[in-house]
């Protein structure tokens, strides 16, 4: 099988983000022939407005998406939705269709019992508008995430780890 490139995108800009930790954990579930990279620089993407020229950060973001065979987006929930920074970055891909027909997995994680379900719904709505490829198993909501992380800042909850591994397996299935 050819080398497969997977891009991870965290909807959180915090350095100690549990959503970024989830993406880092996903790297352990991919076989050796899979290249998994987490995008850095979401905070440098300017506010989207049609007609504005793309700056270096936008070009970097869109290039990373184009080079990826699949994308995993993991987001927190802010005010019942996905963070504006993530939505803004995705908006930059509308006119060029960079995510059209791209296999994508969407994950939300929250310290609340709801697992960021409203952020996940918002993200999935946007991704649907962008024309991504997905199936019924292409999304995951993780409730009470802080209770699932040990003192070493690792996800230690086996059902959560199994669900994350299933996301990786499903994404590879869609890519193939």
Image (cartoon, helix red, strand yellow):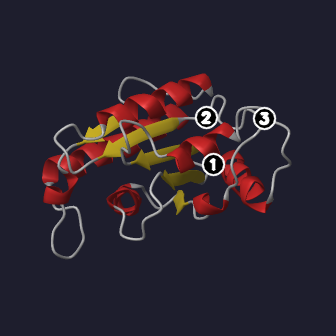
What residue is rendered at 47% in x and 46% in y?
83
- Location of mark 2 (residue): 102
- The local secondary structure at tag 1 comes to loop
- Within 10 Å of disc 2 (Cα), the crowding (few <14, some 14-19, many 20+) is many
Percent from the top left, x then y, of residue 168? 39, 45
Q: Is residue 68 left or right of 33 when viewed as pictured?
A: right
- The local secondary structure at tag 3 comes to loop
Mark 1 or mark 2: which comes first in sequence?
A: 1
What residue is rendered at 71% in x and 46% in y?
66
- Within 10 Å of disc 3 (Cα), the crowding (few <14, some 14-19, many 20+) is few
Does residue 16 lie above or below 52 as drawn?
below
Mark 1 to mark 2: distance in Å? 8 Å
- Nearest to viewer (mark 3 / mark 1): 3
Nearest the viewer among 138 and 56 is 56
- Location of mark 1 (residue): 68
Give the number of the disc on residue 96: 3
Q: Is residue 3 visible?
A: yes
Percent from the top left, x then y, of residue 158? 14, 53
Q: Is residue 139 visible?
A: no
Are the two marked residues, 1 and 2, in contact with CB atoms closer than 8 angstroms? yes
Q: Is residue 20 left or right of 142 when viewed as pictured?
A: right
Mark 2 or mark 3: which comes first in sequence?
A: 3
Mark 3 to mark 1: distance in Å? 15 Å
Residue at the farthest bottom position: 152
């Amino acid at each position: 099988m050819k080398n497969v490139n997977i891009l991870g995108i965290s909807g959180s800009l915090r350095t100690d983000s549990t959503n970024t930790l989830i993406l880092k954990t996903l790297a352990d579930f991919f076989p050796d022939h899979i290249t998994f990279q987490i995008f850095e620089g979401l905070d440098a993407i300017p506010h989207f407005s049609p007609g504005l020229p793309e700056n270096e950060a936008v070009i970097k973001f869109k290039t990373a998406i184009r080079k990826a065979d699949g994308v995993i987006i993991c987001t927190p929930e802010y005010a019942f939705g996905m963070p504006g920074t993530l939505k803004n970055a995705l908006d930059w891909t509308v006119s060029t269709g960079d995510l059209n027909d791209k296999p994508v997995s969407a994950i939300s994680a929250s310290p609340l019992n709801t697992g960021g379900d409203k952020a996940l719904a918002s993200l999935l709505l946007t991704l649907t508008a962008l024309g991504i490829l997905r199936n019924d198993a292409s999304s995951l909501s993780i409730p009470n995430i802080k209770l699932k992380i040990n003192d070493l800042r690792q996800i230690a909850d086996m059902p959560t780890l199994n669900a994350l591994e299933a996301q990786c397996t499903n994404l590879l299935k869609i890519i193939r």
